[in-house]
Amino acid sequence: MTAELDAIAQKMVADGKGILAADESSGTIKKRFDAIGVESTEENRRDYRELMFRSEAMTKYISGVILYEETIRQKAKDGTPLVSLIEQAGSIPGIKVDAGAKPQPAFPGETITEGLDGLAGRLKDYYDLGARFAKWRAVIDIDTAKGIPSYGSIRANAHALARYAALCQEAGIVPIVEPEVLMDGSHDIDTCYQVTEWVLKTTFEELYYQRIRLEGMVLKPNMIVPGKKAAKQASVEEVAEKTVRVLKSCVPSAVPGIAFLSGGQSDEDATAHLDAMVKLGGLPWKLTYSYGRALQAAPQKAWAGKAENVAKAQAAFTHRAHMNSLAALGQWSSEEERKAA
Ligand code: 13P
């Protein structure tokens, strides 16, 4: 079992490949579809995801896809299970298993991610449906004036991540451990650094207490960036240097790979930051992408719910995935971006 877990984790972070986060909940995908004027019906959600899974990007640049409950059971228009499309492309199906971040009792303004009850049984079902990895996202907000985040919230979220990871590994499923420090707000980059350091230290402590096999997991963290509303934004070099520094001080080298979330960065920022980190070199783990918005904003816009736009949307998705693949190899440049566009 452990050899299989390790092999899956390594495949998820294979050279020049990264993960597509296509696990938007029904509420989130509705928001994305609203923005492009598309009604969020089961069929539209299927058509949209099917176009991505049938694109050239899948065979070349996408090691795995995080699916939502609905999608892992859905069939393509021609009746092929969507999971089979992913497998046929040589990519690994994965599944979001948390039940979302809910208000944490006694911690106003903070959340605790739910979904541990009954998880062992659900993981068995997902394994039978083809899932070989899973995702659980903890959400940490920063509001220093209100004392947020608090010790109690970070500790509870890290503990839940570790309990989830243990259940996954028991089921032969690689856990993506995602403690996301949000970039909402006006805090500066050093506050993001300090909070992320605290969150990662606590998370790895809980992973240790729950006896997680580090070789059989993938970490999905935020990058170290200032809040979106911060007066002072940061250069690509500063983000890269600070992100690598915090990861080196918190993430054991037994972890095979780190796949970042994009968190609301622009498409090109998410790519440039990853590229700059890989170019720093001397890293003990692989660095790659596990982007949702930064991979899908362009294809969503190109598609706009119209069948005649499918090829255009697939090209837009493949382009973004290609740029991020180059970044994961430290071979991206803004010239590549223009050349391929
Ligand atoms: P973003 O890249 O849009 O942040 O999404 C990644 C993800 O899976 C968040 O849980």
Image (spheres, rainbow, N blue to C red):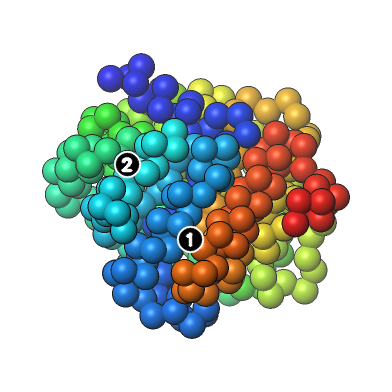
Looking at the image, the residue that sits furthest to the right is: 335
Residue at x 32% of width, y 49% of height? 82
Q: Quadrant of the N terminus?
A: top left
Residue at x 18% of width, y 46% of height? 122
Q: Relative to 139, say whether 116 is above or below.
A: above
Viewer-closest of 148 and 133: 133
Q: Quadrant of residue 69?
A: bottom left
- Disc number for residue 91: none
Residue 323 percent across, percent down from the top left: 69, 47
Q: Secondary structure at mark 1?
A: strand
From where the camera sits, is residue 320 visible? yes
Residue 20 percent across, percent down from the top left: 49, 49
> What is the three-letter code of the residue carrying label 2?
Ser
Residue 9 percent across, percent down from the top left: 44, 29
Residue at x 27% of width, y 38% of height? 130
Q: Which residue is mark 2?
A: 84
Q: Which residue is mark 1?
A: 140
Looking at the image, the residue that sits furthest to the top is: 3
From where the camera sits, is residue 152 visible? no
Badge 2 or badge 1: first in the primary sequence: 2
Q: Quadrant of residue 168?
A: top left
Q: CA distance from mark 2 to mark 1?
A: 35 Å
Horizontal side, residue 327 vs residue 152: left or right: right
